[in-house]
Image (cartoon, rainbow, N blue to C red):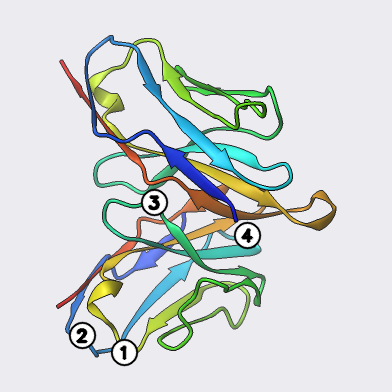
């Protein structure tokens, strides 16, 4: 079955440091890949997505590239801010027959990011 | 646009009791999902509805969990009887296309 593995956390950085959170996946077919973020006290929000190989998703300074050859979707940001402190989830969505996406998400275990001033 | 609404936000019950959670998706979203998020883990899909029909309930513990979406709009998830290991946040999400929008969740504590 499908699975997503994220780097173990928590991750603690100083403001303006470079961030990488690793994510690898196992799936059949051609999944779509997502990063979701959960800020303290809030619900899950979509951060970025990529729907096919070599696509790059980006939002709020975060980027991730869909690498089919390495089955990876690592999250990066060049300069983190205190406001980026949150839990980050990598996820994939499988494809139904005929390429129709049913939207079921399989999540990684989440990575807690804390950014200090 | 109003987001996904869930209630209650918090619930504390004793084991073997029953509990129900309610979800109202974003207007017009045909697909509705219930996820279980145990502390320290990512959300796990329990059940997916397309309108009022079940698409996937393969990971729903059917001996104690049930869910319905009778009119294809709001949905109810029930646990009867609850076990200690059911302590988790129960998330509802809805979608029109590929992006899912999540509600704030219901935090259940089973004592």
User: What is the secondary structure assignment of the residue under circle 2?
Assistant: loop
How much space separates mark 4 and mark 1, taking CA atoms? 31 Å
How much space separates mark 2 and mark 3, taking CA atoms? 24 Å
Q: Earlier in the sequence, mark 4 or mark 1?
A: 4
Q: The C terminus of chain B appears in which quarter of the rendering?
A: bottom left
Q: Which mark is residue A4?
A: none
User: What is the secondary structure assignment of the residue under circle 3?
Assistant: loop
User: What's the residue at 36%, 42% (across, down)?
Assistant: A110
Residue A95 in sight here: yes
How much space separates mark 2 and mark 4, taking CA atoms? 34 Å
Residue A108 rendering spot, x and y as whole percentages:
43, 45
User: What's the residue at 20%, 85% (across, down)?
Assistant: B15
Residue B1 in sight here: no
- The foreground one among B52 and B45 is B45
Residue A14 rendering spot, x and y as whole percentages:
20, 14
Q: Earlier in the sequence, mark 2 or mark 3?
A: 2
Circle 3 residue: B42
Q: Which mark is residue B15?
A: 2
2 and 4 marks in contact (CB < 8 Å)? no
How much space separates mark 1 and mark 3, taking CA atoms? 24 Å
| Circle 3 Cα neighbour tier, 10 Å, few/some/many (<14 / 14–19 / ≥20) | many
Mark whose residue sits in front, 4 or 1: 1
- The foreground one among A5 and B104 is A5
Circle 4 residue: B29
3 and 4 marks in contact (CB < 8 Å)? no
4 and 1 marks in contact (CB < 8 Å)? no
1 and 2 marks in contact (CB < 8 Å)? yes
Circle 1 residue: B81
Relative to A67, say whether B23 is above or below.
Answer: below
């Amino acid at each position: 079955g499908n699975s997503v593995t994220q780097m173990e956390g928590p991750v603690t950085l100083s403001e303006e440091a470079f961030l990488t959170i690793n994510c690898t996946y196992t799936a059949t077919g051609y999944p779509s890949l997502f990063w979701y973020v959960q800020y303290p006290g809030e619900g899950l929000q979509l951060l970025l997505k990529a729907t096919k190989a070599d696509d790059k998703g980006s939002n709020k300074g975060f980027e991730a590239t869909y690498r089919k050859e390495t089955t990876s979707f690592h999250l990066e940001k060049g300069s983190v801010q205190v406001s980026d402190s949150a839990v980050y989830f990598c996820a994939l969505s499988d494809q139904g027959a005929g390429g129709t996406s049913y939207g079921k998400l399989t999540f990684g275990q989440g990575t807690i990011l804390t950014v200090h001033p | 646009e109003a987001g996904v609404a869930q209630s209650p936000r918090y619930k504390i019950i004793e084991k073997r009791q029953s509990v129900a959670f309610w979800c109202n998706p974003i207007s017009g979203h045909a697909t509705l999902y219930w996820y279980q998020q145990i502390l320290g883990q990512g959300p796990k899909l329990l059940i997916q509805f397309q309108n009022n029909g079940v698409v996937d309930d393969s990971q729903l513990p059917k001996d104690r969990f049930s869910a319905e979406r009778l009119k294809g709009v709001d949905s109810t998830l029930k646990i009867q009887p609850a076990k200690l290991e059911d302590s988790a946040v129960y998330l509802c999400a809805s979608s029109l296309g590929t992006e899912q929008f999540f509600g704030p969740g219901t935090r259940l504590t089973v004592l």
